[in-house]
Every structure is written in structure tokens, then in C-alpha cells.
Image: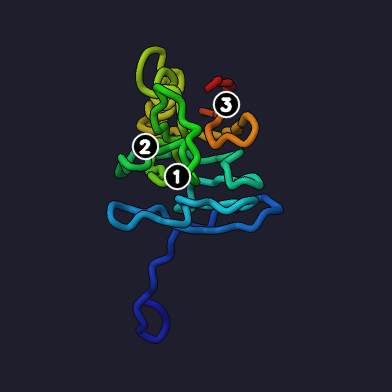
Amino acid sequence: MAPHGEPSVPQGPKPLAVETQLPVVRTAAGKPGQWNSELNAPKPNTTYVVDNKFVYHTDSSGRVVKSEAVLDSTSGGVRNTHQQRTAGNRGGRNDRQPGDQGGHIYGTQYGGPDEDINITGMKAELNAVGTREYGKLEDIWKKAADAGTPVNVKIEFSYKGNSTRPAGYDIAYTINGQEFFRYLAN
């Protein structure tokens, strides 16, 4: 109980500190029937903090150019099949390539948002079939998180021209103080 017999108000997690010169939008991911429209149409030159866990920085075109998160649990989440089918086609554009899938930046197994801000047009071979290079990284991150070891992940995205589909992912992640780096062409 709080002083004077008032019920105490539960406090949420401490706000995630973000270093940026961009405007910061703190918001929550949506769920079926209540998707977050703000995350489906990211504003240009803005930093988004989603669920106090996932950070996304956008460029002058509203594309995610940098993201960061601490993956510390695999509590699971929900999938938005519409977003996965349309990733890479934002704003009426058709930048998705034949054979692309909607690849999550941070998978729903970590509670990653299932809105546009967290899903890119990604070669199927990177995501879920064949070599699964991105999928294998997610497997490594999941194994560490399941063992109680937080994984710090930072990703920078490169684009060709004004395409909304990343040309590549420059990935840095840290597990138990050991840093790993990967570049994946898309």
C-alpha cells in the first residue's frame, strides 16, 4: 500500500534510454484487430521505441536505417500474415523481389512487433529456406535468450536508391561480452 492507505500503482519497466537527435516516439506494438497504424507508416527522421525494448531509427523516407534491441526472452508473439505478404511494398511501391518473404528484423519469438517497421522484404534464402543465414542468426539468439543470456543486437540497413527493400543488413550482436559481426546481402 502507498502512504495514506491508497493502493500502490504498479510501475512499468524503466524507460529505455535512447541517444538520438531525432524526435522520439514511444509506443506499443499492436495485436490482431488492433495493429499500431503508427508502426505501419513510420515517419521520416524519427526514432521509435517499441514496448521499451525495440529501437528503430528512420531516414528521410521513413525507412528503417538502424535498429537495436536486447533479446532476453522468447515469450512469443503474434504474426501478422498480411504484413509478411506485403513487406517491401510500402506506400504503393512494389520493391519486393520475386521469392521474397516478409522477414522480421526481430522475430515474434522475442516479442518483436508485427507491423511494417519490423518487417522487411527479405530473400527467402536468408529468412527461412536454403542457407537461412538470417534465420540461423535468429536460432543463435534464441538459444542464448532461452539459456538466460541477453543478446544485444544492432542492425544497420543499406538501400539502393529510393527502394524500401533493404539491399543488405550489417549486423552486430553481443553474447556474454563477445561481439560478432555479419553482413548479409539481400
Q: Rate crowding at label 2 as few (under 14), some (14 to 19) or many (20 or more) other CA atoms within 10 Å.
A: many
Residue 54 higher or lower than 127, as above or below: below
Question: Disc 1 designates what residue?
Answer: 116
Where in the figure is residue 175, as x and y percent of width and height? 51, 28
Can residue 110 be seen in this snapshot?
yes
Question: Disc 2 designates what residue?
Answer: 84
SS at mark 1 in the image: helix
In percent of the image, x 62 and y 51: which residue is there?
Answer: 44
Q: Is residue 119 left or right of residue 57?
A: left
**Residue 167's disc number:** 3
The reply to whether callout 2 and callout 1 are in contact (CB within 8 Å) is no
Which residue occupies the foreground of this view, 161 or 80?
161
The reply to whether callout 3 and callout 2 are in contact (CB within 8 Å) is no
Where in the figure is residue 146, as x and y percent of width and height? 35, 32
Residue extending farthest right = 21
Residue 115 higher or lower than 181, as above or below: below
Which residue occupies the foreground of this view, 111 or 159?
159
| Residue type marked 1 | Asp
Where in the figure is residue 64, as x and y percent of width and height? 57, 41
Which sits earlier in the primary sequence, circle 2 or circle 1? 2
- Residue 66: image quadrant is top right
Residue 50 higher or lower than 127, as above or below: below
In percent of the image, x 68 and y 51: which residue is there?
Answer: 20
In which quadrant is the N terminus drawn? bottom left
Residue 179 higher or lower than 11, as above or below: above
In percent of the image, x 41 and y 42: which residue is there?
Answer: 112
- Residue 109: image quadrant is top left
